[in-house]
Amino acid sequence: MADKGRPLAGIPGGGSPSSKGPSSISDQTRGGFFQTTFGRQTAFGQFTARNWALLFLILMIVIFSFAGPGFFDIVNFQNIIHLSTGTFLLAAAETLVVITGGIDLSIGYVYGLASVLGAKVMQILGAGGMPVPLVIVLGSLAALLVSILPGLGNGVLITRFKVPPFIATMGMWGICNGVTLFLSDGFMPVMGAPSQINDIGNSYFLYIDPSKTVSFFSKPPYITLTSIRNIRRLIPNSLFLTLLVLFILGFVMSRTRFGRHTYAIGGSMDAAVRAGINVDRHLVMIYVISSFVSGIAGLFNLFQTGIGNYTPSGANYELMAVAAVVIGGASLTGGKGRIMGTAVGVLVLAVLENGLQIAGISAFYRYIGVGVLLTIAVIIDRAFPDMF
């Protein structure tokens, strides 16, 4: 495999200026605006290319604030963040795999498997009379532990048996799908988990009752379902989970040897092998981490909804995750990508869907928007191959 640059230098994404750029004058002339001196070499052109997703996000917020009443409201923004927690985690997991030049199509059904299995274990243990805190802890541990297995299987298939990532993870997609269907008796949601998990999954950091008190992490005990509208809720606790996972993965990828090796493998696997990196072991770890983070997302879904929520549209989760990764600046050819860029990509998709709904526009246009944004992301990746 041709070397794409010098990714071991510690620069995320690595690569020399010629690693993915035009190889001839004719290629440059075919590049259009982005290959011109103004597009490639001016600060404006580079800033726009690097931050186009963030700029587009700001533009959408401005447009939807005028197009739909209630969009520019702290409650709506909190809802966007809270409801996007699963997507944030899945996209972060996918980012690691994409940086290595691979893809993980199984994360959506690992998500469903963790949710359903966690609910099933809680249901069985709760019916046996076990104390509620222990039921929640054991059910959560079961969901997280089982989520490691698909990633381990993917990693072994890809490294030991040299199965292409697309095929290996698609096979695991089917296995997780079948096991989840078995556990949920088809498409039936798994009920019976302790009701307390809803309070945990949907709680806020701060509750303000203007007439009486301020409470942290849980609503005041005197508040009933009929009076819940009288208090102000700020900062969903799900935001802390999202920030924690993003911070850990972002730190690992940008500040540790593990992260540098990940970029090196995506930049050039041959060069990584020659540099002494144990590529096979590293890839197994990447797929295990991806699967485990997807399991965290599935477990959060259980805490958010209170049920083991299997859905036949699980494939949509991984497709939206891949879309967020690409929009956030990663390249499907590997060697390039940022966790924070992926977070911006998730927000772009979430704000697009929310804004269309509030503006009264059919949600079907969301998919058109995603397709357009993906196309723009790929064009920018080809025009600015060494920008990120």
Image (tube, grey):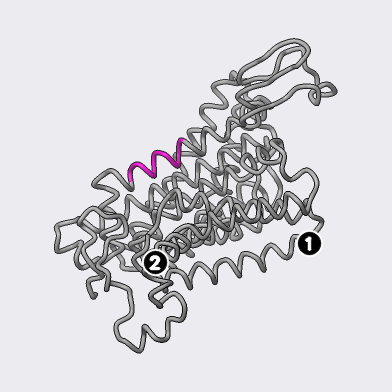
Residue 134: assigned label: none
Which quarter of the rendering shows the N terminus? Answer: bottom left
Residue type at mark 1 is: Ser
**Image x and y of residue 377, in percent:** 50, 67
User: On the image, numbered disc 2 is attached to which residue?
Assistant: 42
- Position of residue 210 relative to residue 372, above or below, is above
Decide which of 86, 63 is in the foreground and name it: 63
- Position of residue 299 relative to residue 113, above or below, is above
**Image x and y of residue 13, in percent:** 32, 59
**Image x and y of residue 189, in percent:** 70, 44
- Check disc 1: other Cα within 10 Å, few if <14, some if 14-19, many if 20+: few
* Lateral position of residue 362 relative to residue 159, left or right: right
Residue type at mark 2 is: Thr
Which quarter of the rendering shows the C terminus? Answer: bottom left
Decide which of 327, 167 is in the foreground and name it: 327
Which label's residue is closer to the chain start, 1 or 2?
A: 2
Q: Residue furthest bottom?
A: 26
User: On the image, numbered disc 1 is attached to which residue?
Assistant: 362
Magenta stretch: residue 251 in it? yes
Q: Residue furthest top?
A: 212
The residue segment tinted magenta is 244-252
The residue drawn where x is 61% and y is 59% is 316
